[in-house]
């Protein structure tokens, strides 16, 4: 029978805050510092003062074998005197605000509505709190660190609570005294000479307001220490509606900290090195962890198979697998995987992918880096490289990395490596297909296949119309190469060309910024003449440049959009077919250019 992983109970608020004060209750280190604004804190204090519910808190028993986190006291506790017995998963903001207000003995760190940092002491206006016509939040007053509220740009004192006597005089009870109000109560009575009216007022205030704090019960959901790390991550993400969203990286950071390893610092150093390559500038911490986990689980499986162990572990990089990645395994593979990402950048440069803006899939970088990590220098062998290239472009034009990617990653690594060693084609190659009519719906760079075709043109040696230069890593950025229309949009609009045809990838190509300014909004015949006349491009050289873009020169010299579109569509399909290493399902004698109104929108 499945045992429950949590207990649900209630606990005195004062008792919970007392545990936080001595360190029995702490925060896991992945919980970032969080400061509620003054309005939130006053509203919270008002709710407790009226015994209104403030929501449950979720705690985790410390000391689990699988879930070990570095811990820290909540904000306001200078030093934990005891080892943590429970950790706060949900309720950090509420408990921290209440602890600082009631027990810290220091002004509360907060901020105003505009985010400006403030330090506030909180008081309850006794008369206002007992007035049934006053909203309780209006009886909760935050005062500056010196306990003096000033008006008229600081020239007039509106409320002075800077001494206990002035607190008694104004009948403002300091919330910092709620846990132990006896001394303040005695001082108040002595200040007023035990005047009957004041004694009765305080008694009523204690019954109606202070007792709400001292008797307040907090609903507590306590996760048992045996709960798996994945469950902690899932639970935290479901309940944590404020603060910083928890990721597997945050959990591993806290876990590895228990082994005195600073994952965040390690990643930041790697991130700076990896991001020097512009094509890798979007690689995130979770991408890196997935690649490390892929390689680690693959090597574990391979080792188990070599030993003849039954039921070897699976290759995977899902959340649960990353969370199982030990600190030792991370340290073993982090350097090789970082090098794998750098090899991935070199691989992409050879394929003419220079910029993350035109990287077809960021997600495909993960299995690519893992493959290159395992292969090492072997990836430079021509036969190995050719298979990697084919796998890569099948993934791009098959548009296979948009969803359920972790499953495909886990298949790619062993299947591509097996294929390289003479095994069957991996499923990514087998599954890939590109429908000819897809060209009509590739309208923006949001689509992987759109970016892929742009890169493919660079790969095929597209020469700039004006300079005749092919793109290299240096010229790509120096010349500001980007994708531009061949038949300009203005010309298309003036000649009744459908937007979907005009804006299709078929009518776009990589050009330098300067060449695109020459193109402008003019007819192709006009800007080609300008290139020949004003920029000294010989007609036969210009035709050669056009053909390198898979453009039939005569079609655009005659401003014949229909012939241009059909010929270039077929040429692009031939290039895609070649890159994928498979025949696309189409009849070359059939006019496949469907009515654009029947084409599906590009919704990626």
Image (cartoon, helix red, strand yellow):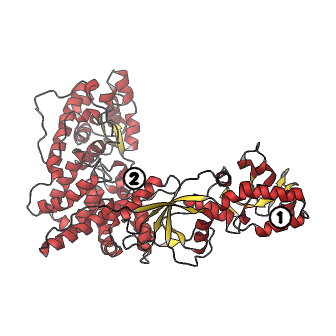
x 26%, y 30%: residue: 556
Q: Position of residue 405 (x, y in %)?
A: 28, 52
Sort mark 1 into few (<14), some (14-19) or many (20+) by Cα contacts within 10 Å.
some
Please state which of residues 254 and 98 is positioned toward the viewer in this rendering: 98
Q: How many marks are shown on the rendered structure? A: 2
Q: Position of residue 250 (x, y in %)?
A: 44, 64
Image quarter hosting the N terminus: bottom left
Q: Position of residue 42 (x, y in %)?
A: 68, 53
Separation (CA) of disc 1 from disc 2: 65 Å
Residue beneath disc 1: 162
Look at the numbered disc 2 and give the secondary structure of its residue.
helix
Whether residue 376 can be seen here: no
Image height of 114 relative to 525, above or below: below
Q: Position of residue 87 (x, y in %)?
A: 49, 67
Whether residue 200 can be seen here: yes
Look at the numbered disc 1 and give the secondary structure of its residue.
loop
Identify the mark at residue 249; answer none if there is no mark.
none
Left or right of 41? Residue 569 is left
Please state which of residues 203 and 160 is positioned toward the viewer in this rendering: 203
Sort mark 2 into few (<14), some (14-19) or many (20+) by Cα contacts within 10 Å.
few
Left or right of 110? Residue 580 is left
Residue beneath disc 2: 478
Question: Counting residues from the N terminus, which is met first, the one under dot 1 or under dot 2?
Answer: 1
Left or right of 451? Residue 221 is right
Image quarter hosting the C terminus: top left
Q: On the image, which quarter does residue 370 sit in?
A: bottom left
Please state which of residues 286 and 83 is positioned toward the viewer in this rendering: 83
Labels 1, 2: front one: 1
Q: On the image, which quarter does residue 424 sit in?
A: bottom left
Left or right of 247? Residue 326 is left
x 20%, y 61%: residue: 413
x 23%, y 37%: residue: 543
């Amino acid at each position: 029978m499945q045992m429950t992983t949590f207990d649900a109970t209630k606990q005195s608020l004062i008792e919970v805050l007392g545990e936080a004060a001595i360190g029995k209750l702490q925060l896991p280190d992945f919980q970032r510092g969080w400061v509620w604004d003054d309005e939130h804190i006053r509203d919270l204090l008002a709710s407790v003062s009226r015994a209104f519910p403030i929501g449950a808190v979720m705690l985790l028993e410390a000391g689990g074998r699988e879930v070990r986190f570095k811990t820290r006291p909540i904000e306001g506790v200078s030093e934990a005197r005891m080892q943590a017995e429970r950790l706060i998963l949900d309720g950090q903001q509420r408990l921290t605000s209440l602890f600082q207000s009631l027990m810290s003995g220091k002004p509360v760190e907060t901020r105003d509505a505009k985010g400006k940092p403030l330090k506030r002491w909180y008081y309850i206006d006794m008369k206002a709190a007992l007035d049934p016509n006053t909203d309780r939040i209006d009886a909760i007053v935050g005062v500056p660190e010196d306990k003096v509220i000033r008006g008229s740009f600081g020239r007039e004192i509106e409320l002075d609570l800077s001494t206990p006597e002035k607190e008694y005089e104004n009948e403002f009870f300091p919330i910092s005294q709620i846990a132990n109000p006896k001394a303040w109560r005695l001082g108040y009575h002595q200040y007023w000479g035990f005047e009957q009216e004041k004694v009765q007022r305080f008694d009523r205030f204690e019954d109606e307001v202070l007792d709400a704090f001292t008797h307040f019960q907090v609903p507590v959901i306590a996760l048992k220490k045996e709960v798996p790390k994945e469950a902690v991550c899932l639970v935290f993400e479901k309940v944590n509606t404020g603060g910083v969203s928890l990721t597997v990286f945050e959990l591993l950071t806290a876990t590895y900290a228990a082994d005195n390893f600073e994952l965040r610092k390690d990643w930041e150093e790697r991130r700076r090195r990896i991001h020097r390559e512009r094509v890798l500038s979007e690689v995130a911490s979770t991408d890196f962890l997935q690649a490390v986990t892929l390689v680690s689980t693959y090597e574990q499986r391979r080792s188990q198979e070599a030993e003849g162990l039954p039921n070897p572990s699976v290759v995977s990089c899902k959340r649960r697998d990353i969370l199982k990645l030990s600190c030792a395994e991370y340290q073993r593979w982090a350097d090789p995987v970082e090098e794998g990402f750098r090899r991935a950048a070199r691989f992409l440069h050879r394929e003419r992918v220079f910029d993350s803006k035109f990287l077809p899939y960021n997600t495909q970088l993960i299995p690519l880096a893992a493959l290159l990590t395992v292969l090492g220098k072997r990836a430079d062998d021509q036969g190995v490289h050719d298979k990697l290239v084919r796998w890569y472009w099948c993934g791009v034009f098959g548009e296979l990395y948009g969803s359920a990617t972790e499953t495909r990653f886990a298949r790619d690594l062993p299947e591509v490596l097996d294929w390289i060693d003479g095994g069957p084609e991996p499923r990514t190659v087998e599954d890939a297909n590109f429908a000819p009519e897809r060209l009509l719906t590739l309208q923006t760079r949001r689509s992987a296949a759109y970016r892929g075709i742009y890169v493919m043109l660079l790969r095929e040696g597209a020469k700039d119309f004006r300079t005749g230069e092919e793109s290299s890593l240096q010229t790509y950025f120096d010349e500001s190469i980007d994708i531009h229309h061949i038949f300009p949009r203005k010309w298309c609009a003036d000649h009744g060309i459908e937007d979907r045809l005009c804006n299709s990838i078929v009518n776009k190509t990589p050009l330098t910024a300067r060449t695109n300014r020459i193109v402008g909004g003019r007819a192709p015949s006009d800007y080609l003449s300008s290139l020949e006349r004003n920029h000294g491009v010989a007609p036969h050289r210009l035709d050669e440049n056009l053909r390198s873009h898979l453009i039939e020169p005569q079609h655009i010299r005659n401003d014949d959009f229909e012939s241009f579109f059909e010929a270039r569509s077929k040429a692009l399909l031939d290039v895609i077919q070649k890159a994928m290493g498979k025949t696309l399902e189409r009849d070359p004698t059939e006019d496949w250019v469907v009515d654009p109104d029947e084409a599906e929108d590009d919704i990626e």
